């Protein structure tokens, strides 16, 4: 009989690290790094990588560096450097003293390039862009050698020094690694490792006019920092031979590169370039628009760091590209807020209801439970009076079968308050629209008691018109109608924008909500989880963002009130 397999020790990268620690390959060290290019703000895809790199380091008693791979001055900005730092901290991770920039290594990288030239492993090439492409060839046919390939070391050194000194215009020369013009892997066909760029860098200013290419700077930065496990996304798998070649050629410390599948999320886009297009085209209100998958957007929407970390745990780490259903992310935030968010009542599409047998000048306060999942959250008093608002959807003049909410002659329970029965409907003479309902209430049902054991199937929420506070409520929905807009045919993701991704309404809320703080999260019963907008809310005047709807609210309330 086979002995059962030991419980899974987790994903493949965790197992690689465990093995390396067992065999002593890294001298017992675990040093990972999170290496963003500061050319756009962090998004939830980055969160997956952040969670893994910082998480693994913490798990194995190691450290995780934050390193900005800032090798392209034309697309990078200090704004994004700050955004990454802020959002990594927000997610709950800390790089301690280990904050680095590839640009801090420019001098050393230059020295490494000189060393490669001296070893005959790099040369200056004068081909223009068109020629360069033509000489490189295609994977199935070997490329052609650049005339620069046979240039003498001394001459290469001389031209490279003059490139640095600013003697040449952009595009006049590049420095290339001398590898293999016949390799089926195009990344090994003498890739460019330095180019002239007469641009001011956000950290080094105008000191440099040549900049290392990402592939050259990245592996050497990893090496300089003695990273043990250099974890990156799958598209870098084909770059790995180059990563290894450069470190071997220079005979320097050699981390191990490991690739995993990036996160793709349904009904959204993650590429920085496409996100930028949305922001610049004003399709969204900015980088922190609550519909964007940026961390700033998710935060503004009301997502918590814990829910995002939970999501990143649940999706796991694999080698296969796939599309993760955004419903899983929504599930994670619901799961958390179900336990932590206070329930309150708010009516977003109001219909006025007059309770004819309730005295005009009377008011009373009913006890309402703050969170049925957590008795320690206690209860509050909710005011009730003769005129209330209910959701328009909770009334049907001609109710279909199994419509247990309010209808003419039908009785319904007002959450926490009493039973009411609809006696008449008032309509607008001209439009025929229902403007008001008249009801009677059963005094014996006050406070939710069930008089004579009578069964009332439906429970609806409400607010007292006289006591309600009005607030702007932003109903956010998915930004795209297409499941995978980036891959949709026609190559025009903008065509798939959801025209109703934001609907702004005036909500009528129970009065206690005037005192919520910005960023507070609550459940509007039966409607969803909402967050007081952290930017636009004013004292006493909150603005609410819908984080997510409550998929199963009906089922729950029906069950709860059946007994
Ligand atoms: P984009 O394609 O959006 O520009 P990028 O890969 O160029 O993204 P970087 O700033 O270079 O973004 O990424 C920093 C780190 O985050 C890299 O290690 C990268 O592998 C990782 N990363 C980026 N996007 C994702 C994603 N969608 N899922 C997982 N990891 C990601
Ligand atoms: Mg990148």
Image (cartoon, grey):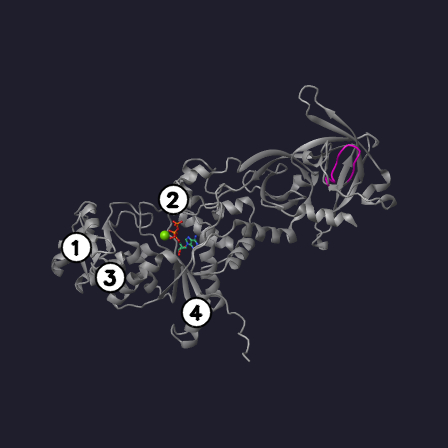
Q: Tell me if I can see residue 557 in this picture.
A: yes
Among numbered discs 2 and 3, the one appearing first in the sequence: 3
Element type at mark 2: helix
Residue 539 in the image: state x and y as whole percent.
61, 38
Could you give the CA–CA distance between mark 3 and mark 4, rounded to whole angstroms? 29 Å
Answer whether labels 1 and 2 touch (C-beta < 8 Å): no
| Residue furthest right in the image | 452
Q: Is residue 165 visible?
A: no
Of mark 1 and mark 4, the one earlier in the sequence is 4
Q: What residue is pinned by disc 2?
A: 273
Secondary element at image label 1: loop
The part of the chain drawn in magenta is 402-412
Quadrant the N terminus occupies: bottom right
Q: Is residue 528 left or right of residue 296?
A: right
Q: Which residue is mark 1?
A: 144
What residue does disc 3 label? 112
Find the distance from the CA under tag 1 to the CA under tag 3: 26 Å
Q: Which residue is mark 4?
A: 17
Mark 2 Cα shell of 10 Å, populated few (<14), some (14-19), many (≥20):
few
């Amino acid at each position: 009989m086979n002995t059962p397999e030991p419980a899974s020790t987790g994903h493949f990268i965790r197992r690689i690290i465990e093995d390396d620690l067992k065999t002593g390959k890294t001298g017992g060290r675990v040093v990972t790094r999170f290496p963003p290019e500061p050319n756009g703000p962090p998004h939830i895809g980055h969160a997956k990588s952040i969670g893994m790199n910082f998480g693994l380091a913490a798990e194995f008693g190691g450290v995780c560096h934050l390193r900005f791979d800032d090798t392209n001055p034309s697309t990078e900005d200090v704004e994004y450097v700050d955004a990454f730092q802020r959002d990594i901290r927000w997610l709950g991770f800390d790089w301690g003293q280990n904050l680095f920039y590839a640009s801090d290594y420019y001098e050393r990288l230059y020295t490494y390039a000189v060393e490669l030239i001296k070893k005959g492993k790099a040369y200056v090439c004068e081909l223009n862009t068109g020629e360069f492409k033509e000489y490189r060839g295609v994977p199935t046919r070997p490329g052609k050698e650049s005339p620069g390939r046979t240039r003498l070391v001394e001459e290469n050194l001389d031209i490279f020094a003059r490139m640095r000194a600013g003697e040449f215009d952009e595009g006049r020369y590049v420095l290339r690694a001398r590898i293999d013009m016949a390799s089926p892997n195009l990344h090994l066909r003498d890739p460019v490792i330095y180019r002239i760029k007469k641009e001011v860098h956000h950290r080094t200013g105008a000191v440099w006019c040549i900049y290392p290419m990402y592939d050259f700077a990245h592996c050497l930065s990893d090496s300089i920092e003695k990273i043990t496990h250099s974890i990156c996304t799958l598209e870098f798998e084909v770059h790995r031979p180059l990563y290894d070649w450069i470190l071997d050629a220079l005979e320097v410390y050699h981390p191990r590169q490991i690739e995993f599948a990036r996160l793709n999320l349904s009904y959204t886009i993650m590429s920085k370039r496409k996100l930028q297009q949305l922001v610049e085209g004003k399709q969204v209100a900015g980088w922190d628009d609550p519909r964007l998958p940026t961390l700033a957007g998710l935060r503004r929407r009301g997502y918590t760091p814990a829910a995002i970390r939970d999501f990143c745990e649940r999706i796991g780490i694999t080698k296969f590209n796939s599309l993760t259903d955004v419903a899983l992310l929504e599930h994670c935030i619901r799961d958390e807020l179900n336990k932590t968010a206070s329930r309150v009542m708010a009516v977003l599409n109001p219909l006025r209801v007059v309770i004819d047998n309730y005295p005009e000048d009377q008011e009373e306060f009913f006890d309402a439970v703050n969170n049925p999942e957590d008795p320690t959250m206690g209860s509050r008093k909710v005011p009730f009076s003769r005129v209330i608002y209910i959701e328009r959807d909770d009334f049907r003049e001609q109710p279909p079968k199994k419509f247990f909410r309010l209808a003419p002659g039908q009785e319904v329970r007002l959450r926490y308050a009493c039973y009411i029965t609809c006696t008449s409907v008032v309509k607008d003479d001209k439009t025929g629209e229902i403007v008001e309902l008249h009801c009677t209430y059963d005094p014996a049902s006050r406070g939710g008691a069930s008089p004579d054991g009578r069964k009332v199937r439906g429970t609806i929420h409400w607010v007292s018109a006289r006591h309600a506070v009005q607030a702007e409520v932003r109903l956010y929905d998915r930004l795209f109608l297409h499941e995978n807009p980036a891959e949709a045919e026609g190559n025009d993701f903008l065509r798939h924008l959801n025209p109703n991704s934001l609907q702004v309404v005036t909500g009528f809320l129970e009065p206690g909500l005037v005192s919520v703080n910005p960023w507070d999260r609550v459940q509007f019963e039966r409607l969803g989880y909402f967050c007081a907008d952290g930017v636009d809310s004013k004292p006493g005047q909150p603005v609410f963002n819908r984080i997510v709807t409550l998929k199963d609210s009906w089922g729950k309330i029906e069950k709860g009130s059946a007994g």
